[in-house]
Image: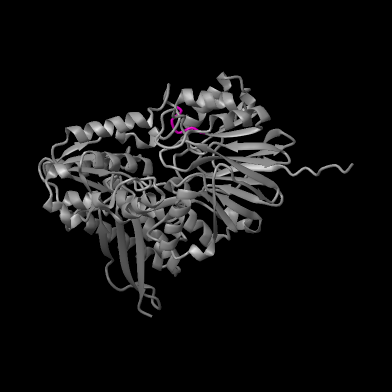
Amino acid sequence: MEKSISKPVSIYALGGLGEVGKNMYCFENENQIVIIDCGVKFPGVEFPGIDYIVPDFTHLKNNKNKIAALIITHGHEDHIGGIPFLIQHVNIPVIYAPRLACALIKNRLEEYRMLDQVKLVEYNNQSKFKIGDFDISFFRVTHSIPDSFGVVIDTSEGRIVSTGDFKVDLTPIGPDIELRRIAELGEEGVDLLLSDSTNAENEGYTPSEKNVNDSINEIFNEAKGRIIVSTFSSNISRIQQICENAVKHNRKIAIVGKSMEKAVEISRGFGYIKIPDSSIIKTEDVRNLKGSEVLILCTGSQGEPNAALSRIATGDHKDIHIIPGDTVVFSSSAIPGNGIMIAHIVNMLTRAGAECITNSILADIHSSGHPSKQELRLVLKLFSPKYFMPMHGEYRMLRLHAELAESLGIPKDHCFVLDNGDTLTLAKHKINVGYQVEHGVTYIDGKDINGLDAAVMSDRRILIEDGMIIVAISVDSRSNELILDPIIYNRGVITRKNDKVVAELTEIIKEAVKEKLSGKPNFAEIKAIIKSKVSSYVYSKTKRNPMVIPVIMSKN
């Protein structure tokens, strides 16, 4: 009898470990790479000018011939938003995605004119695919968006299960989590479990969608004027509940923002949002109705300057302006770093006469779609894995999840708290820590899919925090003499009134350049001495390290 050849499987994340966002998990053997999810992370104010943060795809580019498929667990942006940037760099033969995620991905790829570059295949909980050496199947989970799934990867070396994002909701809005299937997988044997850690700090159970619906109903009962709800356009379950309550309370729905309009259109087409055409109005028709007859659904819950809510708050929206008596509901928790922008929007809305609700159960959107400790314990018990790797969460969340697994009897040396780029190797049903793959982040500015590197972001932070000084000098390159006194341009460093400091700095540069010119230096050496002298002097006066840009103009 012929002996089967071992094909060890490497498991690693290019995003999603030590952070909430840009989820991307890879499963690689000598022949194939199968990827689960490709998401973005939304930047805070510490990333000036950046629209998205995505994983560094260098490792995948270096192994592009091995990429067999991309599997999507659900349609949230932190799981699908990076797809256009990925397929620009590598060929993805096929993307497997559930129904709603498929539609959202198609819409996104159409925006980038990339739809013809990839094959999209829809799956459900009955689907099974053979992708090279990997056998793939699925189980349905409950999350804050319909059509969410966990993934089972069967290999010659053992079984790997990824839960995707989930919670155990016994009264969900939509289909139940397949606890029976999870238990069956556990009975059959799971070698490695990867499980959602986002809510691992919270004891007990995550509130049911029914509780959230009760909270929405209460807001509709109490609000006398217009209700304006701001949320992410991908929070389909929440949008569904909000719209259905609007119909119930005889409010017409105005949808503001292109992404929100598209999300509602797609979800209505699939029956995930059930509202009659007669309940939807154009934004210009809002003025013709009483406040108690209107719901305005918009984007901008993170205080984004160009989003619909910001334009409404500043009075820049062509049809909708805040009037006293409006109730504005922020239906998502603040992304770290965005608190200042949100507070600014709340202040503007309040000044205009609106009541702002930022701390209801609706505001805890991200956590409400993820499992708390009792749900994590239940799923760990049902899967009963030999080895465990917490995923999707900041480091403290991953660590707490691992400790939870240990408390249920999984040996400590079988629990792995990893960083992006770290690998585990599965061979003959045993796990060992492997090598590290190249990883990092790419900053997306606008629609530049090539991204910006860390050096550019460092420069932007310096400009924001410490300012910039440009020093222009004119040199006669034949006689090696300074033709004119240095000219100093500064932004955000030295006040215009402080002429004395500028004069002193001019003299310091002038003397240093003259001394350097006596030794017949090249331009690089002159620039270096200017940078050194300016940096040293400015720091002594301001305790700042501005960006210094020397400009040399040569006569000859």
Q: Nearer the viewer, residue 81 or 103?
A: 103
> Main SS type for the magenta part?
loop
- The tally of labels here is 0
The vertical placement of 477 against 550, above or below, is below
Looking at the rendered image, the quarter that the C terminus falls into is bottom left
The residue lying at 25 percent from left, 33 percent from top is: 217
Residue 79 on image: x %, y %:
47, 46
The vertical placement of 230 against 503, above or below, is above
Q: In terms of image quadrants, where is residue 434?
A: top right
Residue 493 on image: x %, y %:
26, 52
Observer able to see residue 499: no
The residue lying at 47 percent from left, 33 percent from top is: 176
The residue lying at 44 percent from left, 63 percent from top is: 525
Q: Residue furthest right?
A: 1
Q: In terms of image quadrants, where is residue 455?
A: bottom left
Q: Nearer the viewer, residue 422 or 208?
A: 208
Residue 56 on image: x %, y %:
52, 52
Looking at the rendered image, the quarter that the N terminus falls into is top right
Left or right of 58 on screen, residue 453: left
Magenta stretch, residue numbers: 196-200
